[in-house]
Amino acid sequence: MKWLFALLLLLPNIVLGAGSGELSIEGDSVIVYSGPSHKFRPLFVANKGERFPVAFEKVGAIDEAGDFYKVLINLKFGNKKRIGYIFGLDPVRMVATSGAQEDLDAYEGIALSRTSLVINFHTLQNKTYQLTAGYLFYPTPNLFLKAFGGQVLTVTRGSLVAGAEVGVEHYLSSRLSAAMSLGGGAVFSPNSDVLFVGSSKVDNTIQVHGGLRYNTGPKAALHFGVSEVSYFNRNSGVLVIGGYVGLEVGL
Amino acid sequence: MKSLLLIFFMSVQVFAKGGGETTIRYYNDGETQVLSPHLKATTSVYSDSIELGAGYSMDVLSSSSSDVKSWASSSKISDTRKEYDLTSTLEFRNGSVGASYIQSDETDYSSKTVGIGTSRDFFEKNTTVAIGASFGSDVILHAKDPKFEGLMKNANLNISLTQVLSRVSLMQFQFDHRVETGFLSSPYRVARLKQPDGSILPMPENSPNVRSRNAFTFRYNYFWNALNVSLANSVRLYYDNWGVRSYTVEPKVTRELSKSLSLSADLRWYQQYEANFYKDTYDRADFGVFTSGNKSLSTFRSMLIGASPIFKFGGSWELVGRYEYYKINFANYTNVGIPQDPTDDKMYELTAQVFGVGLSKEF
């Protein structure tokens, strides 16, 4: 009977009853997702030869066809183990383990949305405020792109701002991640000298934001951190630093 | 005693990885001499997840340059700049987050800069994205005027994308944006106003109080297997809102002569075009709001040729030598000599040599 069980473990993509083994990565790179769907945020790319403790029973995908392997992953920092998901049709293989079986149900999931709507409020030097709404998308694990638009507010007037950002993220735990992004765009003002002395009707902006994101679940996250913002044109400009808070709603 | 031993062994386990380096550099252009010793140490803690570093540098300067001789009350100046830096880097599965603090002090200038940065590898470590930002605050003083104080804030924002192209080549794009606001002139330097009689009247500088600077750099590295030679090349384009534009080309060749000895040679060619308000001498007719005597805002070109032998020994020791020959030719900055005597004026040029040696070890 033992030989039959061992033979079954060698077959790829096989569904067994309750229990644990390891999932071996057979392809060059396989994405580990934070939830059982391609709509969840990708966490990292697992390389050929890597192995993860796995639940034999696959999980049905949410809002799409197919199913996912539920695996135990290590987020490295602090050696915190969490639950990740690998698509059932990816090049992987179940293998038997001789050590103690991991109880995957004892670990926390992460489940983050791949696309989100983000609202940020920045309070900057010189009584300058920036309020933006953006569309956030993760094309690959830990890299996000964001398009944003909103207003730059000074004491007396407001200007429109629009631009795009690219950023990277590192998971500190299942709920907390560190993120940093650099963005650029244009600021449209009704008149000259609105945003800074020498500003024109169309100015440029380059901004860096760095901080922490607290994930409250798949549909929401809070973030906060520091911003360094430059508004400038060919003749003049202003440099302001400050802080920001934001709310992210998963789509 | 037992507890002391325990602490010692615990610290050996905690500080798993580290290194140290020391370098000394001597610059001499005939008018200015600078001796620059530098020390740096790094260690890692928490299962090598966190790297900590500390550095100390000095610049011991003595100068009798044309600026000093022409416009300062003394014919020679000397100063010492001391710089301290602290760095920490948190390592992740495929990337890192880092923070740094740098403080630099000299008699009439002090600077504090804090920085944060992050990098992340993608696609089996073939692609790396790095983002960084720093904020600095500088205080500019005058050695002979205790009431003078200028403030300058600056920020650097940068992003880079590095792509491995093959087993022997990689390329990198980098964008740097720097903004400086506040007092951007020098309390010592002067703009030169030409008088109707032909003599020169020194005027205090007045630069715009905002400068936004942008640079795009492209790097391409290639390892030539057959010759055991690596090539590292870069091209940099720069422009700012003062109208300064520049181009830099920097090729470098390194050849491994044996397992313990390699030799590198590099060239740096630089061409710059002047700021839109810069003039070598201002006439009363075109004397505008902004004036400057800063030769680094003028049109000039420079060339640097360098060579470095690198000797590895004892497993993890490295000894590096360095020689640089530097030449700069200004197209519109005059070495005025005696300011009241226009007959000794000539276009400024400078030739410098740099000698350096460094020793480093990884633990």
Image: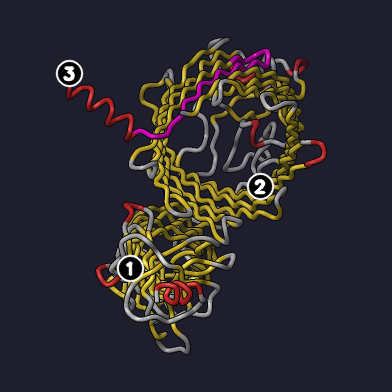
In whole angstroms, how far apart are the C-alphas of marks 3 and 1? 53 Å
What residue sits 43% from the left and 66% below the top?
A43
Where are the magenta residues, as a range? B15-33
User: Whole-Å distance between the Cαs marked 3 and 2?
Assistant: 61 Å
Q: Disc 1 to disc 2, how far (Cα)?
A: 34 Å
**The C terminus of chain A: image quadrant:** bottom left
Q: Which residue is mark 3?
A: B1
The reply to whether label 3 and label 1 mark residues of one chain is: no
Q: Is residue B220 magenta?
A: no
Secondary structure beneath disc 2?
A: strand
How packed mark 3 is, by other alpha carbons closer than 10 Å (few <14, some 14-19, many 20 or more), is few
Disc 1 on helix, strand or loop? strand
Q: Amino acid at mark 2?
A: Tyr
Q: Amino acid at mark 1?
A: Gly
- Report the quarter where the N terminus of chain A lies: bottom left
- In the image, residue A25 above or below residue B96: below
Residue A223: x and y in percent read 32, 65
